[in-house]
Each structure stands twice: as C-alpha cells, then as structure tokens.
Image: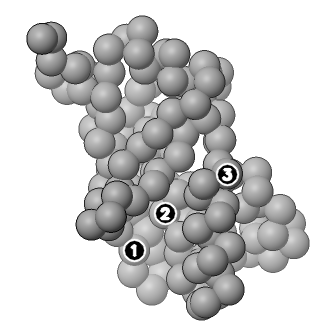
C-alpha cells in the first residue's frame, strides 16, 4: 500500500550558484559519506557530471522528505538518507540513525527514480508499507 509520494525538480544552475557561493561546502552538507565519495570521483572526471550528481541527490532527499511527510525536520536530515546505485545503476535509498529507526518503526520502504538533463534534474520517491510475511 502506498503511503506517500514525493517529487522534486531542480534547475542545475540554481545549485551551481549555491555551490560556487559556498565554495563547494554545500556538497558536504547535503551528501552522506558514500554519496560524497562518488561525487568527488565524478567531479574529478567531469565537473558537469559531478554537479548533476549533487543535484540528483539533493532532489532525491527533497522528494523523500515529502514522501514520508516530514519535510526537512527530524528525524529527516540531509545526511540521514543516501541515494546510492546498485551494480546495474538502479538507484536505491539507505537510511541512517533516527531516520532508519523511523522507517523500521513505520514498516515503510521507499523507491526512488532520478533523471537529469543538461539544465534540470528530477526525483520521484514512492513510500509504501512493507508486506507482512
């Protein structure tokens, strides 16, 4: 059963301006440790792809926060949710700390999909109740 849906759309130029203004610190604020490693790797290979990665992860966190109905308030924090990729490239969400406990207590799971173009990124998250065994 679906309990929530979240969506976020972000213009890449908006994040680029914030990234420049904060001298890159925004990436460390938004990204979890595993995401940050991937971001640095992608950024070193291609700055535009690195920025797109940062944008998709930001959008995923925003969409997730909407899908679970919390917005950006505890237990939701920027680093309590990470969007990683399995070997096939499919994105998936991981939770940490109080957010992980919140999801387990509710019995919820979340699926995420991401897309990016040259000037915009989008993320959609569907939150559903785990099936009882």
**Which residue is identified by label 2?**
56
The quadrant holding residue 21 is bottom right
- Tag 2 secondary structure: helix
Can you see residue 24? Answer: yes
- Tag 1 secondary structure: strand
Q: Residues within 10 Å of mark 1 (few under 14, many from 20)?
A: some
* Pointer 2 with pointer 1, Cβ within 8 A: yes
Residue at (37, 11) in percent of width and height: 106
Question: Which sits in the foreground, 99 or 122?
Answer: 99
Residue at (32, 35) in percent of width and height: 110
List the single residue furthest toward the front. 87
* Picture layout, residue 22 above or below residue 79: below
Give the foreground label among 1 and 3: 3
- Tag 3 secondary structure: helix
**Which residue is identified by label 1?**
116
x, y (%) of residue 44?
A: 68, 86
Question: Which sits in the foreground, 122 or 109?
Answer: 109
Report, in whole angstroms, how far the alpha carbon at label 1 lies from the one at label 3.
22 Å
**Which residue is identified by label 3?**
33
- Compared across the picture, whether 27 is left or right of 126 comes to right
x, y (%) of residue 59?
A: 49, 55
Question: Which sits in the foreground, 57 or 62?
Answer: 57
Report, in whole angstroms, how far the alpha carbon at label 2 lies from the one at label 1.
7 Å
**Which of disc 3 and disc 1 is earlier in sequence?**
3
x, y (%) of residue 102?
A: 49, 16
Quadrant housing the C terminus: top left
The quadrant holding residue 99 is top right
């Amino acid at each position: 059963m679906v309990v929530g849906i979240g969506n976020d759309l972000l213009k890449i130029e908006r994040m680029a301006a914030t990234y420049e203004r904060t001298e890159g610190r925004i990436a460390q604020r938004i990204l979890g440790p595993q995401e940050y490693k991937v971001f640095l790797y992608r950024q070193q290979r291609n700055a535009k792809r690195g920025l797109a990665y940062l944008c998709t992860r930001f959008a995923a966190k925003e969409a997730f926060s909407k899908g679970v109905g919390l917005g950006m308030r505890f237990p939701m924090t920027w680093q309590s949710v990470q969007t990683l990729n399995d070997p096939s490239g499919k994105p998936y969400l991981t939770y940490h700390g109080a957010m992980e406990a919140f999801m387990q207590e509710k019995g919820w799971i979340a699926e995420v999909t991401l897309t990016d173009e040259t000037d915009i990124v989008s993320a959609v998250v569907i939150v559903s109740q785990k099936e009882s065994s």
